[in-house]
Image: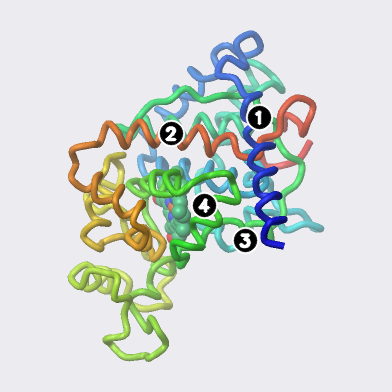
């Protein structure tokens, strides 16, 4: 049984890497040569008006890729007969859908029915990082949009309570390794989180229900600060910066905090529970290898952006990102 699972996993990885091989940086060279320029221009406008959207737009691409591959399925609206990914609990805190459609509409005015919503997401995520002072990478393009979006399938997204074993398994299921896990978790240098994503670490952690019942993996003074912010387990509106002080800047600050046991989620902290990922965190925490983190991040993003993509005659080029043609 175990060997069958390994075989199936290996086949999934081979299939996804062969689909990735069909993506091409110059895919729209003839059909929409200004695609990257247009996305970039709009992203500059969007982030000038709403700088806090950089994090959400990066996260949208991650949530797209981990469910049915990077096929734009996260963008599809629910219908009377189907609850889509978008409305499942892990996705209820996603933001930025309007910006995706705004860019798609601008592209369609120049090159109608040509650029997929999945490609728009990949370009927007890259620009969100670049415009936050992070690394640039060329984005291979040519993804097609999927026609299916099912709320239950969001169980493939790692929860913030995940431990290192669960995280490693969920990433491996997408053909991503431990290095991708620790590097891509660095995306938490951007953005904010709602209290329920981590409040279980602050209150009644094991169910003992006393003031001392907190996650021992969390630095005590940081814990006190987080408690002051999230007053109770019931608080589901307050936000906390994930990399306090520089949550709008893409840098290695996430690792510096994590090494001091100040990672926000249990999943962040659990990167210290494995020798390899902990080694990466400590190396980056020194602040001396930021260029290396930037290169690693770019490489892992290209890998993640190739997970389970639809190419060639598969899927469709959606006219509106939120509805199947
Ligand atoms: C390793 C497993 C991961 C887990 C368990 C996880 C979990 C979460 C959770 C719970 C939030 C907070 C949502 C909220 O309460 O509003 C969040 C936010 C975020 N995540 Fe992750 N994440 C993971 C990996 C990633 C990856 C791979 C990326 C991108 C490369 C990413 C990028 C982000 C960003 C940018 C935000 C901030 C969004 C905002 O400002 O609204 N995460 N993540």
Closest to the observer: 89 or 80?
A: 89
Where residue 194 appears, as percent x and y from the top left, is 41, 63
Q: Which residue is labeled 2 in the image?
A: 46
Q: Earlier in the sequence, mark 1 or mark 3?
A: 1
Q: Residue furthest right?
A: 81
- The CA distance from mark 2 to mark 1 is 24 Å
Of circles 3 and 4, which is in front?
3
**Is the residue indicated by label 4 positioned so its CB lies within 8 Å of ligand 1?**
yes
| Image quadrant occupied by the C terminus | top right
Where residue 134 appears, as percent x and y from the top left, is 33, 33
- The CA distance from mark 1 to mark 3 is 23 Å
Tag count in the figure?
4
Q: Is residue 175 at least partly visible in the picture?
A: yes
Closest to the observer: 149 or 176?
A: 176
What crowding class fits label 4: few (fewer than 14 Cα within 10 Å), some (14-19), or many (20 or more)?
some
Where residue 72 appears, as percent x and y from the top left, is 64, 40
Q: Which residue is labeled 1 in the image?
A: 143
| Image quadrant occupied by the N terminus | bottom right
User: Horizontally, is 61 left or right of 276 in the view?
Assistant: right
Q: Earlier in the sequence, mark 2 or mark 1?
A: 2
The reply to whether the C-beta atoms of the residues labelled 3 and 4 are less than 8 Å apart is no
Residue drawn where x is 51% and y is 62% of the image: 166
Work out whether 81 lies above or below 97: below
Q: Earlier in the sequence, mark 2 or mark 4?
A: 2
Closest to the observer: 56 or 268?
A: 268
Work out whether 31 lies above or below 66: above
Of circles 2 and 1, which is in front?
1
Q: Is residue 71 at least partly visible in the picture?
A: no
Residue drawn where x is 47% and y is 41% of the image: 57
Residue drawn where x is 28% and y is 87% of the image: 211
Work out whether 38 lies above or below 271: above
Q: Earlier in the sequence, mark 4 or mark 1?
A: 4
């Amino acid at each position: 049984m175990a060997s069958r699972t390994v075989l199936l996993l290996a086949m999934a990885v081979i299939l996804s890497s062969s689909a990735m091989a069909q993506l091409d940086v110059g895919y729209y060279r003839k059909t929409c040569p200004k695609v990257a320029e247009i996305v970039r221009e709009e992203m500059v406008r969007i982030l000038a008006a709403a700088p806090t959207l950089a994090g959400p737009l990066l996260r949208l691409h991650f949530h797209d890729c981990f469910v049915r591959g990077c096929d734009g399925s996260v963008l599809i609206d629910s219908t009377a007969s189907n609850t889509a990914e978008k409305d499942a609990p892990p996705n209820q805190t996603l933001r930025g859908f309007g910006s995706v459609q705004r860019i798609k509409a601008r592209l369609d005015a120049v090159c109608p029915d040509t650029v997929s919503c999945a490609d728009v997401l990949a370009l927007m995520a890259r620009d969100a990082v670049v415009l936050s002072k992070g690394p640039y990478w060329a984005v291979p393009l040519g993804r097609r949009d999927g026609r299916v979006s099912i709320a239950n399938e969001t169980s493939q997204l790692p929860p913030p309570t995940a431990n290192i074993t669960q995280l490693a398994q969920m990433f491996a299921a997408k053909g991503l390794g431990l290095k991708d896990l620790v590097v891509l978790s660095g995306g938490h240098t951007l953005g904010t989180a709602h209290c329920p994503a981590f409040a279980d670490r602050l209150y009644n952690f094991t169910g003992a229900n006393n003031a001392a019942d907190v996650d021992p993996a969390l630095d005590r003074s940081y814990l006190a600060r987080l408690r002051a912010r999230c007053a109770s387990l019931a608080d589901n509106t307050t936000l906390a910066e994930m990399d306090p002080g520089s949550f709008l800047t893409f840098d290695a600050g996430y690792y510096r905090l994590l090494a001091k046991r100040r990672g926000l989620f249990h999943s962040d902290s659990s990167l210290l529970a494995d020798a390899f990922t902990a080694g990466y965190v400590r190396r980056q925490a020194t602040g001396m290898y930021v260029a290396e983190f930037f290169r690693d991040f770019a490489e892992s993003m290209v890998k993640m952006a190739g997970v389970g993509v639809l190419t060639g005659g598969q899927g469709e080029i959606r006219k509106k990102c939120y509805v199947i043609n």
